[in-house]
Amino acid sequence: MLQISFIRQHTELVKDRLSVKQYSDIAIVDRVVELDEQVRNLKVAAETLQAEMNLSSKEIGVLMGKGEKELAEQKKQEVALHKNSIQLLNDQLSAAEKNLQDEIIKLPNLPHSSVSNGKNPEDNELVREGGTKPVLPSTAVPHWELIKQYDLVDFETGAKITGSGFPLYKGKGAKLQRALVQYFLDYNTAAGYTEYLPPLMVNEASAYGTGNLPDKEGQMYHATADGLYLIPTAEIPVTNIYRDEIVKEQDLPIKMTAYTPCFRREAGSFGSDVRGLNRVHQFDKVEIIQLVKPEGSYAILEAMVSHVEQLLIQLELPYRILRLCGGDMSFTSALTYDFEVFSAAQQKWLEVSSVSNFETFQTNRMKIRYKDEGGKTQLLHSLNGSSLALPRIVASLLENNQTELGIRLPKVLHGYFGAATI
């Protein structure tokens, strides 16, 4: 959530940055400023009346001590009137604060100054590419055919158990999932990330804290009887570990990693974009999250990008890194890098990770703070990234490494999988 003090002091800058993000309702910024002015005026009026009432209350005691009961009774009537007026002002203040809150949470995070004014994915900036695209034989097939050939994933039984988009991994397919998860976690913990195994359901406060509510309400599975949400990413429960806390400066940066299944309602409908593992309702993902001091957050963002890049290098997958334009960024992000791997059989790039800096947008909602050297309480910056989301990694590994003798696995997975090929 944007800080109201910043909006008040930099109104035109806020409008300009929101336009970069292709945000349509720019007029909301003026409504927020007006509501903020209303809230502040009501607070001043209520505080002024409270001070007058307190003074009158003291005078009552003095007058009673002097025996001036008639004047004391007049003061009591003034106090009663003040109480009524203060109650009325407080009611108006509560309504105004709610209106302000309802409006300000509609505002997305402001994009970093380096974010370009693009409208869609075609306008994203290519940062760099790595790896070598394989040359496949004419007999090569996409991963959904390889999955059947090697009996790795059973989509039909998954649909019977739950529904479309809920794959059932089996045999070596399940083992490959486990190998990848373990490799990712080992790689992350070796880099200083503390591993967590969080709950897979969160309450409304947690989903609100990371900006998933109200923005992504329709994308999350909602257990309405209990008011809980199945997580679309480990980012939600893990970041909320520090909600409403003041972190010690010596404990920064805080580096966390977690493996979780993830659940997302939007999974598309027809076409190759959603075939096989390209897009599913349930998938496994390993996440990295950092809470850091503001002055170093963009250097840490670049370090996290390099961290994810090394994973893809070790997996021997051709990849590219994109800096997202304003129109393709998420509601909460200030700057995002997307990673895509090349799927040789499909001849297309598949997104496998996003690494983002949210600055204070999430920590302001969650009140995650630290005390600086001067003892002043400051908001931290939060960052997160996928390292990595498994379905499209698996799809690319299968397609890019298919041979007449089986699926060749990258060397880094041999020990985890227990074999060099499927």
Image (cartoon, helix red, strand yellow):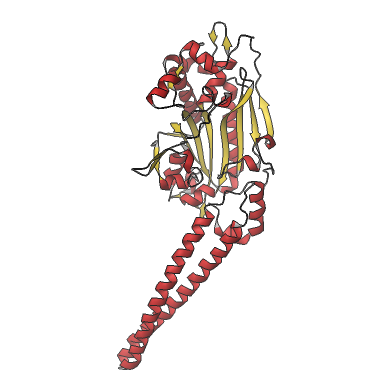
Furthest-front residue in this view: 270
In the rendered image of this protein, does residue 79 appear above or below residue 403?
below
Residue in the picture at 45% in, 64% down = 95
Pick the residue in front: 374 or 394: 394
**Residue 159 x, y percent position in the rendering:** 42, 24
Tell me residue 193's x, y (percent): 48, 34
Depth check: 295 or 123 in front? 123
Residue appearing at x 37%, y 87% in the figure: 75
Reply above or below: 399 against 229: above
In this rendering, the count of numbered labels is 0
Please identify the residue farthest to the top as the structure is shown.
405
137, above or below 225, in the image = above
Residue 81 vs 386, above or below: the answer is: below
Coordinates of residue 322 in the picture (x, y in percent): 65, 33
Location of residue 114 in the rendering, given as x and y in whole percent from the top left corner: 68, 44
Residue 217 visible at all:
yes
Q: Hey, which quadrant is residue 298 in on the image?
A: top right
Would you say residue 368 is visible in this rendering?
no
| Quarter assignment of residue 320 | top right
Q: Residue at x 50, y 26 (%)?
A: 184
